[in-house]
Image (spheres, rainbow, N blue to C red):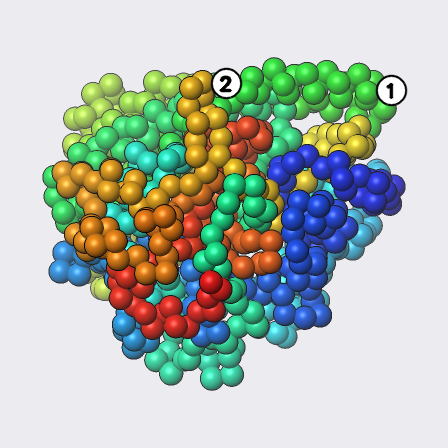
Amino acid sequence: MKKFFYTILTISIILTSQLRADEGMWIPLLIEKFNIEDMKAKGFKLSAEDIYSINQACIKDAIVIFGRGCTGELVSDQGLIFTNHHCGYRQIQQHSSIENDYLTNGFWAMSKEEELPNPDLSVTFLERIEDVTEKVLNGIKKKHTEKERNEIISQNIEKIEVEAVGGTNLAAIVKPFYYGNQYFLFIYKKFNDIRLVGAPPSAIGKFGGDTDNWSWPRHTGDFSVFRIYADQDNNPAEYSPDNVPYKPKQYLPISIKGVNEGDFTWVLGYPGGTTQYITSDAIKLIKEIRNPSRVLIRDKRLEIMNKYMEENDTIRIKYASKNYRVSNSWKRWKGEIIGLERLNAIKRKIELEKEFNAWAKDKKEYKDVLQELEIIYQANKEYVIAYDHFREAIRTIEILDYSWEFSKLIRMAKGTELDDSWVSEIERLKKETESFFKDYEEKIDHEIFKELLPIYFSNVDEKFHPNIEGLNVNYTEYINSLYSKTIFTEKEEILDIIDRGSKEEIKKLAGDPIYAFYNKFYKTYNAEIYPVYDSLNKETIKHYRAYMKGLMEMQNDKILFPDANFTMRVSYGEVKGSYPRDGIMYKYYTTLDGVIEKDNPNIYDYDVPDKLKELYQNKDYGKYEVDGTVPLCFLATNHTTGGNSGSPVLDAEGNLIGLNFDRMWEGIMSDMIFDPEHSRNITLDIRYVLFIIDKFAGATHLIEEMKIIE
Ligand code: ASP
């Protein structure tokens, strides 16, 4: 292990100038060691300490994990945060109704009193990072099996986490890097009183909808504004009207000086997950099996959702957030297939693997590793198919999933599980039931069920078919009978049962046709599919750990960055357009003019709000105007992924110049292979954000809170 670190350290000293341009998501703690020279050579004006420090306030103190899967950043000394519209979408949707349709009309709190609390939303600050590899691997010997190794690691991790934060209001989490060749500890502070301050209408914040998602040229004003509240001592607290705006250690100044092609830019945020080092077999599985089948299933779901959403406004509001969650990955998966094909990804990986095998042939530790992985992928194929189909085609049937919420209570009623949490389980189910029915439309679910069930049975190996009485190829009839007999579609009846809390009655729910059907499926999944799928996956980790270590030794003229794992990372690159295809050139920026070009009152996603058209007609752009219009989005070469949504895009001096929100279609496979020609992150220009807040919404009090550099 020591040798491994020594290798890394040596490489860092000799080779910082040879890093591959723009690819990489780097650990803030190691910027000084691995990246700062390269960053400075490319135009960065600050020091590594300015980004990450435990001795002084620094830029990392202005960055938060927003909710569970996005990034946000502080932009005022009163706890104001920016993130993407699609990151705050669920909250905006939850506050919306036909009377107060914030999705369509936007929402702006004109004073702090009007800001809206969000019970399930939190933001999390990173306090510090520590390399704990030695502590985590303490006690591990060569003779240990993988299982023993994992047990020791888990115990060590638990100890480290408890020691790090015991008796404080902080949280600690240790995460593996490079497939467990290295471990880092992250200390976090979480705030739970987060209020919605502002959101533009969807026709700005989600402008272009699915059609424009993941693509360029882009005109989406993808931002929303929230505020962190703390107790009187500036500490995290649950929601209370007495809470006050949080005073951050650091917030970001905003530069409206503008961006030019070639400018240095960087992103500090929480990329969710990448798999840069997977083998050709893994890519083949994704490209040829996983993505195509998941896309097909989601095609059906989206088709049905869209049909009803277009017909009816209440349904549109109910399903807006669900629909977005389905369509976002659906489109990305499609793009990945095309990108992997164009890049000849499988062939490229095979070439690397040949090189590796030649290098490793006399090295005991590495020589069989690729073959081992190949065997596992082969063995796992049918399990992967079954796993994906269960999760995409069965578990997504809303009524099934909802009925399963009752499984714990049913077990308690039957006396097979301790019932000391009976009361809290009853309370949880009441809430769950209210929130389920708030956004449920039976006819959509029913129709989707009828489409998806046959797909499971025709694509998944027979040995994973649950034996369900009465189910034959006439799926429609069978599903109709489930819906006609179940009680789970009846909100009031269900609430009455929960209220009465009679164990006899609750036990009977297990016989409900919907519950019984899902129970059968779930049992098959739990017994036949998941355990093998999971253990084979875990098995791959062991071999990837060796492969990764071997790759680092073999390619010792490079620094390989660790895959993203939803920990804070720095990506850096430059503002740059692209030549996506023969005869097409993508300019690096778009403007408000493009919004007007795309205006189409007949399509919800392109129906430009009148107020915006008025501002356009009057050229009422204030200080955000450039060449008679307002800049909107720009492209850059920063390596980002999901989770980076809402991340600040910064200039060389650390000023906020935009919000990262997407990637360009032609380079979308960058989670697996980054293509310098086509992989681009898409940033919402901060001038458009301010223009909308200031001129469109008239929320000038927010602008006054910010530090704007002109
Ligand atoms: N738009 C993306 C997302 O929602 C962000 C990205 O992957 O670049 O996940």
Q: Is residue 53 above or below residue 300?
A: below
For the residue marked with disc 1, what is the amino acid?
Asp
Counting residues from the start of the chain, the first of labels 1 and 2 encountered is: 2
Q: Which residue is mark 2?
A: 341
Which of discs 1 and 2 lies nearer the camera? The answer is 2
- Which quadrant would residue 596 be assigned to in this image? top left
Q: How many marks?
A: 2
- Which quadrant would residue 537 be assigned to in this image? top right
Secondary structure category for the residue under label 2 = helix
**Residue 8 shows in the view:** no
Q: Which mark is residue 272?
A: none
- Which of these two is toward me, 355 or 681? 681
Instruction: Give the CA distance from mark 1 to mark 2.
Output: 33 Å
Q: Is residue 15 above or below residue 109?
A: above
Q: Which residue is mark 1?
A: 362
Quick check: is the Cβ at mark 1 less than 8 Å away from ligand 1?
no
- Which of these two is toward me, 51 or 17? 17
Task: Residue at 80% x, 43% y: name it.
Answer: 12
Task: Residue at 18% x, 26% y: name it.
Answer: 476
In contact (CB < 8 Å): disc 1 and disc 2: no
**Residue 349 shows in the view:** yes
Quadrant (top left, top right, bottom left, bottom right) of the N terminus: top right
Q: Is residue 573 left or right of residue 148?
A: left
| Crowding near the residue tagged with mark 2, few <14, some 14–19, many ≥20 C-alpha atoms within 10 Å | some
> Where does the image place residue 300, in percent across and percent down from the top left?
27, 28
> Where does the image place residue 507, in percent across and percent down from the top left?
30, 51
Secondary structure category for the residue under label 1 = loop
For the residue marked with disc 2, what is the amino acid?
Glu
- Which of these two is toward me, 257 or 407? 257
Task: Residue at 70% x, 19% y: name it.
Answer: 353
Task: Residue at 55% x, 20% y: name it.
Answer: 343
